[in-house]
Image (cartoon, helix red, strand yellow):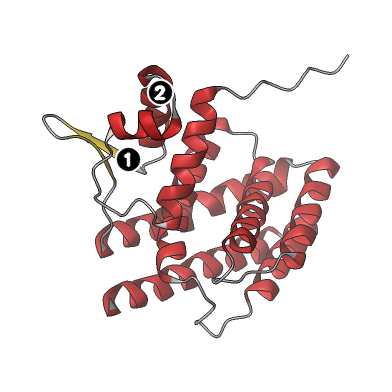
Amino acid sequence: MSTPPRKETISSRISARLRSAILRGDLAPGAKINLDRLREDYDVSISPLREAVSRLMSDGLVEFEDQRGYSVAPISAANLREITLLRAELDVLALRMAIEQGDLEWESDVMRALYRLTHAKRDAADAAMTDAWEAAHTEFHMALLRGCKMPLLLHFCVMLQNMNDRYRRLYLQADVTGRDIGAEHTAIATAATSRDVGLACSALQEHILATGNALAQRLGAV
């Protein structure tokens, strides 16, 4: 008998809404998070709201400071550099383990995620379209890594991807890099499902570093 799907909680829904607002930049980096105002806006009690904000703290998107309360995590060139370097190491480690341990279901998940991503459209002028592309993009990268069967490693990878996505959505809303991102994703997925560890890992690492460098240039130009 299959396990019934876990019911989404109020705090889960609030967390998802706040995460989207932070990633889109609707809640600006460094902005104070007013729980009383959010409680009124979302029409919820303070308990699930605090739980939702705590979840975002574990994602690295929210910070807490005594006397000041909660605020959106700030951004900086140093923070972006650290995120990029950590992703280039941890995501590649997770992919290496996934290629070694992933089964046929993992391969199918990767190729399904690639198909959805390549058929999604990205348009900075269309919020719904952009959100759909972002969801497909996140799912593709995580599908690559899930086969590693290392929950703690995956937790770190998810956290770093959330932090990286915020920079990308703030500073690379349009493709201004001249890269063929679709081809890069396809090359990573093809090498991974072909069990070519060296090619897949080098392709993913180059992909992460290239995005990090493009973001650093955009951040420095602002």
Where does the image place residue 196, in percent across and percent down from the top left?
73, 61
In front: 156, or 38?
Answer: 38
Q: Is residue 52 visible?
A: yes
Image point 27% across, 65% down: which residue?
Answer: 77
- Type of amino acid at the residue the image marks with label 2: Glu
- 1 or 2: tag closer to the N-terminus: 2
Indicate left or right for 159 with 8 as reference: left
Q: Which mark is residue 51?
A: 2
In front: 77, or 166?
Answer: 166
Vertical placement of 47 versus 21: above or below? Answer: above
- Type of amino acid at the residue the image marks with label 1: Val
Q: What quarter of the picture does the N terminus occupy?
A: top right
Q: Which mark is residue 62?
A: 1
Where does the image place residue 138, in percent across and percent down from the top left?
60, 52
Image point 61% across, 68% down: which residue?
Answer: 203
- Element assignment for label 1: strand
Instruction: Characterize the local packing of mark 2: few (<14), some (14-19) or many (20 or more) Cα atoms within 10 angstroms.
Output: some
Where does the image place residue 175, in percent across and percent down from the top left?
54, 78
Instruction: Characterize the local packing of mark 1: few (<14), some (14-19) or many (20 or more) Cα atoms within 10 angstroms.
Output: many
